[in-house]
Image: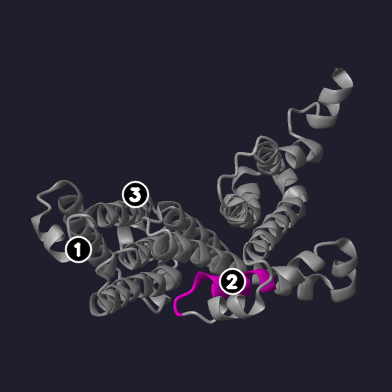
Amino acid sequence: MNGLVGTLIKSNGRPTGRLLFWISALPLLWLAVMILYGDLGEDPEKTVSEFVGPWAVRFLLLTLAITPLAELTHQHWLIKNRRMFALYAFFYATLHLCAYLTDFQLAWSKMWADFMGERNPITVGILSFILMIPLAATSNRDAIRKFGARSWKRLHWLTYPAAGLAVYHAYLMVRYIKEETPWQEYASAIILTALLCYRLFANIPKWTPLSEADAKAHPLYGFGGWLYAFYGYLCLRLLLNLNNIFGPPIGMIGMYGDDQYTIMQFAMGIQMLCFMVFLVLAPTQHPATPKATITALCIGVAAMISGMAMLENFDPQRFGAVIIHHGLTALFYALYLTKSKRVNITYHQRIAPET
């Protein structure tokens, strides 16, 4: 018994690769039980496809989340299992594709018509799978030695567009094929946005203390009042969102419809939490304020865009206005936060005194 436990859990309490391997295989084992007991329904291929497809997306997101989790929690042993999760994502995606091909009984003309259909999730899903093929083929040490570490890392940036296409494929399937509200896909899009922002903004400079002389020499000296303008803007948006979420929904229902009101409530709730990041961190002059704020604002933009895309009465003009408004807001914050060095550069009482 001790030998079995030792192969699954290390002495320091961390799970071994074998334990994570079998945990990752649980969806496959559950599928085997469903097949064994004949619980696949009238259309077994469709049931298998719909069961393993979401797991491919989940493992793709898990693969992308490994590095941020390891860095934020200082649990660097997680990185050793990243390749295994990525291969599981490709494995479940392959099962998903095979079930789809079996469902069509290899009728190529019908599949081609399906592939070329308007707003068809099949096209997006195939493109995502094609991007995953080189990723799976190079997920080994020999490939790293052959391509070189830098080129190999650049190649594996394809994981992000592959995951984005996979999430969009799932969204189209649920929204237009099943005609259901894609809540899970909405959450996946927000998680993917957060992970992508974390990687893109990894090199954003932190706020650092400045001496009085350095503060006066800084290009943004004298523009610190913008910070208070940002405070005021976000506080106003926060109050508006609170009113839209918890207040009289008459205006919101008129804009989006009674059935769609919950979607916009959810989107505005996420955006409100994203606003809170800046309002909490900036007054404390936390060094990570630029990176955390810009990441949060991008997640808020993604939440609003995804929420509006889920609406049945989709309005392109209103959609474009939301992108412009929230995009410019995030851009102005990004420019100020990445260039200001520190929130206190214009306030003498907060500047580190000359030594």
Q: Which residues are magenta?
A: 118-131
Circle 3 residues within 10 Å: few <14, some 14–19, many ≥20? few
Element class at badge 1:
helix
Q: Main secondary structure of the magenta part?
A: helix
Residue 7 place in picture, x, y as percent: 85, 30
Residue under circle 1?
256
Q: Residue at x 81, y 24 (%)?
A: 5
Q: Earlier in the sequence, mark 3 or mark 2?
A: 2
Q: Is residue 339 visible?
A: yes
Residue carrying label 3: 280
- Which SS class for mark 2? helix
Q: Is residue 310 left or right of residue 234?
A: right
| Label placed on residue 161 | 2
Depth order, front residue of 6/185: 185
Q: Position of residue 133 (x, y in %)?
A: 74, 70
Vertical placement of 319 versus 99: above or below?
below
Callout 3, which amino acid? Val
Occupied quadrant, residue 122:
bottom right
Q: Where 181 sits versus 304, above or below?
A: above
Instruction: Report how far apart the C-alphas of labels 1 and 2 lie in the structure.
Output: 30 Å
